[in-house]
Image (cartoon, coloured by chain):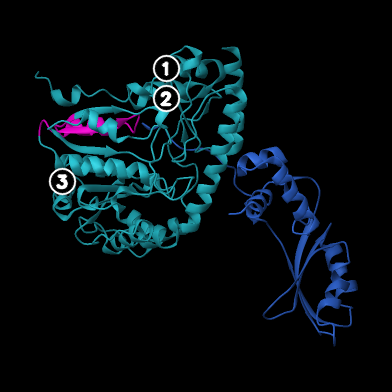
Chain colours: A blue, B cyan
């Protein structure tokens, strides 16, 4: 792996790692790693440093939904302009163009079921290019972004002659 | 009543390390860097194949030598990694871990009085297995100035008319030392000249951090003189599955299989099915784990430098073997004191042979977070010495 790949593979899992530690793990000079990070940010390869929060373990209520959206593509613009109209809503966390039975996958975060329902009703379904929607609420997250949320690591290795 | 115990077994010392780890277990809040097995779970697709084989009712013995499909995969694997071809039917068989293969190879090849050269520090079982096979173990003391590689001179110094076998334990537990092609070429020369056989324990072969592992069987004339031992424990994090293999000349394999069939029958069937999947589709897993180990290896070496603990840079296995001579204590005292005062458990180098005196083995089969907590304790301990 080159430095770029190494940096990305580590930082994708741990965005809190500092440049010094990153350089130790990769076995490269600090300055080289710092420059690589800067370049990655400038090129938009690194788009942000987020924290994974399991909100279900807090007292704060969050509701997540996946919405399958069928739309009419617009002449000359394809799906891009309708996608843009949808992703500008702050409650929309992700929008993907999909192959298969529907066109856009919209992922939504709201405070309550009602809030999500009203967004779908009032904002999404009423867009004239939207032909249909199918809303799926997330009931439980087992694994997210490669991290298993339901398991705590425990070292169960027994003592054995080395 | 008559003494129920045979003399040969009584004379073999139990592994000294047991006692030490009993104390570790009783120490509340202790961090251990003592375990010599991967901290990763066996990759899910491999476990899944094991489960699937059970669902299908694959619960019978396999042939004594192991599933043909697995032996074929092993053959393919050695071909693609070392460029050497083994006949899956007559030159490869499946064992209960690499450790069984070590025992069988020695038992099949030596007569009483034959000498077996054992480089140390090394894995604890070579010497007792040689003794159980009525051979005479002859220890070669590896040196830090050679980065714990074995040199031709060291072999020549110990070779006698009775020497029959040279154990080649690289990548090495506990030092992490590797033998590169040039190093092996010099050993091969001596082996040919002195008409020796090699038992090459390459269980850590997938875990090297400076180029790919070279097996001595890839050198001219060595395949016919070598028992190549490998397994699934370290590379695929499959320790509990107990599965390894031996490859070598047909006439030797025949005798090894004979002992295996009387003592063991066959290696665990479920594990064999899982291992087929490991060899077929496990390369990416091995790569991922190797990268993680490498990060940890670099982290530890950088920490040792920072806190003033001398250590040569090892490029294999998942161990580092720092030198503690400058603190003027024995390895045993160092480890006991470290455990008592800072609740950090590492293994004294002497567990792997007398020449491990002055060294400690630290395993990095632990998460980085774990290693960080451990290094804080080690730093505190050293700063007080």
Of mark 3 and mark 2, the one earlier in the sequence is: 2
Q: Are marks 1 and 2 in contact (CB under 8 Å)?
A: no
Q: Verify whether residue B123 appears in magenta.
A: yes
Provide residue B376's location: percent of width, then percent of height: 62, 25
Q: Are marks 1 and 2 on the same chain?
A: yes
Mark 3: which secondary structure?
helix
Q: Which residue is mark 1?
A: B332
Q: Which residues are magenta?
A: B112-136
CA gap, disc 1 and disc 3: 38 Å
Provide residue A30's location: percent of width, then percent of height: 70, 40
Q: Nearer the viewer, residue B214 or B171?
A: B214
Mark 2: which secondary structure?
helix
Provide residue A73's location: percent of width, then percent of height: 81, 84
Q: Is residue A50 left or right of residue B358?
A: right
Q: Which residue is mark 2?
A: B21
Q: Nearer the viewer, residue A121 or B277?
A: B277
């Amino acid at each position: 792996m080159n430095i770029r790949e190494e940096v990305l593979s580590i930082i994708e899992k741990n965005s809190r790692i500092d440049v010094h530690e990153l350089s130790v793990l990769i076995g490269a000079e600090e300055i080289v790693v710092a420059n690589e990070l800067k370049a990655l940010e400038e090129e938009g390869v690194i788009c942000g440093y987020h924290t994974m929060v399991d909100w279900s373990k807090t007292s704060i209520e969050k509701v997540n939904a996946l919405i399958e959206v069928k739309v009419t593509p617009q002449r000359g613009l394809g799906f891009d302009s309708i996608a843009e109209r949808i992703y500008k809503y702050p409650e929309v966390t992700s929008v993907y163009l999909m192959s298969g039975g529907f066109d856009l996958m919209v992922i939504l975060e709201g405070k309550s079921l009602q809030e999500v329902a009203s967004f779908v009703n009032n904002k999404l379904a009423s867009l004239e290019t939207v032909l249909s929607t199918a809303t799926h609420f997330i009931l439980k997250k087992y694994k997210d972004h490669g991290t298993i949320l339901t398991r705590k690591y425990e070292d169960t290795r027994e003592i054995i002659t080395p | 009543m008559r003494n129920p115990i045979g003399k040969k077994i009584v004379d073999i010392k139990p592994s000294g390390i047991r006692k030490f780890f009993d104390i570790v277990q009783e120490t509340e809040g202790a961090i251990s860097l003592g375990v010599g097995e991967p901290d990763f779970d066996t990759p899910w697709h491999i476990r899944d194949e094991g489960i699937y084989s059970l669902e299908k009712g694959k619960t019978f013995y396999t042939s004594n030598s192991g599933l043909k499909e697995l032996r074929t995969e092993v053959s393919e694997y050695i071909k693609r990694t070392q460029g050497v071809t083994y006949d899956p039917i007559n030159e490869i068989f499946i064992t209960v871990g690499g450790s069984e293969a070590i025992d069988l190879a020695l038992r099949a090849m030596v007569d009483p009085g034959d000498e077996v050269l054992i480089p140390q520090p090394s894995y604890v079982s070579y010497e007792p297995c040689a003794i159980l096979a009525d051979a005479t173990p002859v220890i070669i003391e590896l040196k830090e100035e050679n980065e714990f590689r074995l040199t031709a001179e060291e072999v020549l110094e110990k070779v006698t008319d009775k020497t029959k076998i040279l154990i080649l334990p690289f990548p090495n537990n506990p030092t992490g030392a590797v033998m590169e092609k040039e190093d092996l070429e010099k050993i091969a020369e001596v082996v040919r000249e002195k008409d020796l056989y090699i038992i090459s324990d390459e269980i850590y072969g997938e875990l090297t951090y400076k180029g790919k592992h070279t097996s001595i069987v890839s050198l001219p004339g060595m395949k016919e003189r070598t028992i190549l031992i490998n397994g699934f424990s370290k590379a695929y994090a499959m320790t509990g599955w107990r599965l390894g293999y031996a490859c070598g000349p047909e006439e030797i394999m025949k005798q090894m299989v004979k002992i295996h069939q009387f003592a063991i029958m066959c290696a665990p069937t479920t594990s064999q099915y899982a291992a087929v999947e490991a060899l077929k589709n496990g390369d990416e897993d091995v790569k991922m784990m190797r990268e993680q180990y490498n990060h940890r290896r670099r982290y530890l070496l950088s920490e040792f430098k920072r806190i003033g603990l001398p250590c040569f840079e090892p490029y294999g296995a998942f161990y580092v073997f720092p030198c503690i001579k400058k603190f003027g204590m024995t390895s045993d005292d160092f480890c006991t004191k470290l455990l008592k005062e800072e609740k950090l458990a590492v293994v004294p180098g002497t567990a792997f042979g007398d020449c491990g005196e002055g060294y400690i083995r630290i395993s990095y089969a632990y998460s980085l977070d774990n290693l960080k907590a451990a290094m804080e304790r080690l730093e505190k301990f050293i700063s007080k010495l």
